[in-house]
Image: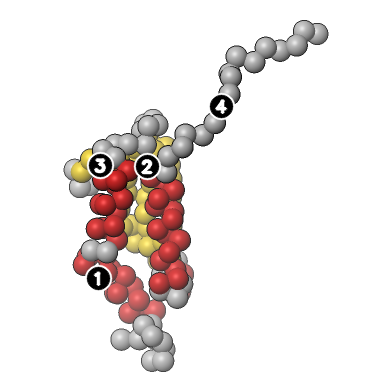
Amino acid sequence: MAAQTDFWGDIAPTAVRTPVAILREQASLLGAKTKNLIEATVFTESVRGSFRHVFNLVVPALDHYTYNLFAIDHGIDFYPVTVLNRDLKLETEEAFTNWLRTELSSDNTKKVIGNLLAQVAVDPRSPWAV
């Protein structure tokens, strides 16, 4: 039998931080900030040839109550990123990370997290008790 010829050449991952990697990085930080009362998850799916990443807040103590904070789409080239339901297109990694920083630290996000913490902070000795 003849040896197979490899037409693929060298293959390596692209050297760029992907939007999903950035989202997962930020999601991993929320649990520590809330003593794991609220966690963040990133759900990824393929939608019509694009990647969709849904960023959720999850409260394990409330039967894993899930609040969808936002969702983004992007193609195979990562950028631009489209923020769904906001008519917003972010052309670069820098634009995306700047938007994400603003979104995660916004008054609205803090209010949602505060309301969720109030739901689980039933122990008056808890640092999250209201």
Question: Label 2's element?
Answer: strand
Question: Label 1's element?
Answer: helix
- Quadrant containing the N terminus is top right
Q: Nearer the viewer, mark 3 or mark 2?
A: 3
Q: Amino acid at mark 4?
A: Ile
Disc 3 and disc 2 in contact, CB within 8 angstroms? no
Q: Nearer the viewer, mark 4 or mark 2?
A: 4
Q: Residue tagged by mark 3? A: 90
Q: Nearer the viewer, mark 1 or mark 4?
A: 4
Label annotation for residue 111: 1
Q: Amino acid at mark 1?
A: Lys
Pointer 2 local density, CA inside 10 Å: few below 14, some 14–19, many at least 20? many
Q: Amino acid at mark 3?
A: Leu
Q: Residue tagged by mark 4? A: 11
Quarter of the rendering containing residue 74? top left
Residue 54 visible from this viewpoint: yes
Q: CA distance from mark 4 to mark 2?
A: 25 Å
Pointer 3 local density, CA inside 10 Å: few below 14, some 14–19, many at least 20? some
Q: CA distance from mark 4 to mark 3?
A: 28 Å
Q: Please report the residue visible at 58 percent of the width from the left and 24 percent of the height from the top.
A: 10
Q: Amino acid at mark 2?
A: Arg
Question: Label 3's element?
Answer: strand
Disc 3 and disc 1 in contact, CB within 8 angstroms? no
Q: Please report the residue visible at 64 percent of the width from the left and 15 percent of the height from the top.
A: 6
Q: Please report the residue visible at 41 percent of the width from the left and 42 percent of the height from the top.
A: 18
